[in-house]
Amino acid sequence: MHYNYANLQKDLGNTNLAKYHYEEAIRLWPGHSSAHNNLGTLLNDTTAAETHFRLALKAHPQHAHAYFNLANLRQQQGRVGEAVALLEESLRYDATNRDAVSALAGLYGDAGRPAEAENLHLALLGARPTDPVVHNNYAAFLQRIGRREAALRHYEAALGLDPEHTVALVNTARLMRTLDHNKQAEILYKRALAVAWEPEIGESLGKLYLNTGRLEDAEATFNTVLRLHPEMLSSRVYLARVKLQQRSYVESEGLLRLVLAQSPHHQEALFQLSLLYTHTNRTQDALSLARLAAHNCSRPPTLCAHLHAHYGDLLNDRNNVDQAAQSYQLAVELEPTLTHAHVNLGALYHTKGDYARAWRHYLTAHGQEPSNSLLLENMEKLRRAQNLQQATTSMAHCLNKS
């Protein structure tokens, strides 16, 4: 009874009460494997959590969920090899555990074993063909490896089985965004919000409006998110971006200052405030903020890359060419597809006469944006400079021989 009551309290989010009753269950029955396992999932102390997972396995050596939870612990600790072995053991005793399949498939994929990862999903799909979660998880895997059409089919299968599956609705919307099907993405986000008004989903809809130039819709959506969930700092930053594009500079700065008052090192807020200062000709303030944000940025890599590129732009404008090149180089190392940084790196090397390096960066950028007019103009200038250099070298060689 203590164990069952603890499960109820755990589901209700009453963590302390749940822990107390799991502990009572264990006091009355020290070998209660599931009580040990479930208690371990509620503990912040990883050493204590591991102790309970191991006690669960000692009492029940085939406890699939205890292996799974211990694997999660190992993954958080960066001990990936052990996590893989524990997940394999978990699936040995329960091959239909959706979470274990997704976790192990993810680790296989990270290790360059995509075929084995896909086989895990396919085996589970064969065992549970009418489970929308299984279709959604397989679709997410397919999307990660670039098979977008196949992913879409399985997202549609998941929604056919459960039209109100919010995770599948949001994932399909994100896939639609990558395919530039913005109207379909909007419909899917709205369907998900009709099921459950989650702030993250509302923010995603607002971002869709922002990125497609629907500023009034974006403003209304972010305001709704913040009215219902004022703790969403990211939505406040996105609303500041809307205000910046609307040239409401004072309002934009006020929103960003509110974010930084609560989170002084909020990288996106620092980035946006630096951009705002660039727009309003406060170049020294923009440079200081960009330096602070870029040098303290560790993740996510894409945001850090944009920060370094922005800092490079400001340095370049001040003719700090070498420092600018270093910032652009850091940007492309973090995000190799950042065309803007490759173009500017190419231009810097071009100016310095390092034509080979300039050409490499131009070619990389051209592979990503073949119709970029500035890039095409720079490439043509570089060709003429290379031809002139070759002609000059040939003439000098002839003169030396004569």
Image (cartoon, helix red, strand yellow):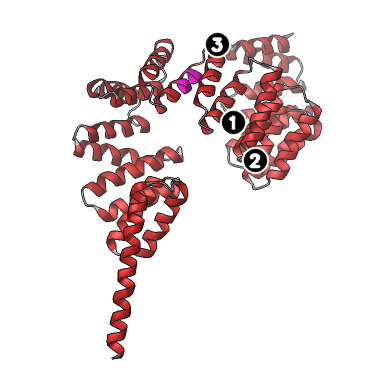
Q: Please name the amino acid that badge 2 sits on.
A: Leu
Q: Which quadrant, please, contains the C terminus?
A: bottom left
Q: Quadrant of residue 129?
A: top right
Q: Is residue 298 left or right of residue 311?
A: right
Q: Please name the amino acid that badge 3 sits on.
A: Ala
Q: Which mark is residue 194?
A: 3
Q: Secondary structure at mark 1?
A: helix
Which residue was labeled with disc 2? 107
The question of residue 396 being in magenta is answered with no
Q: Secondary structure at mark 2?
A: helix
- Image spot of residue 77 (x, y percent): 58, 38
- Image spot of residue 382 (x, y percent): 33, 61
Q: Is residue 207 left or right of residue 254?
A: right
10 Å neighbourhood of mark 2: few (<14), some, or many (≥20)? many
Q: Which residues are magenta?
A: 200-205
Which residue was labeled with disc 1? 46
Vertical relation: 341 (above or below) 150: below
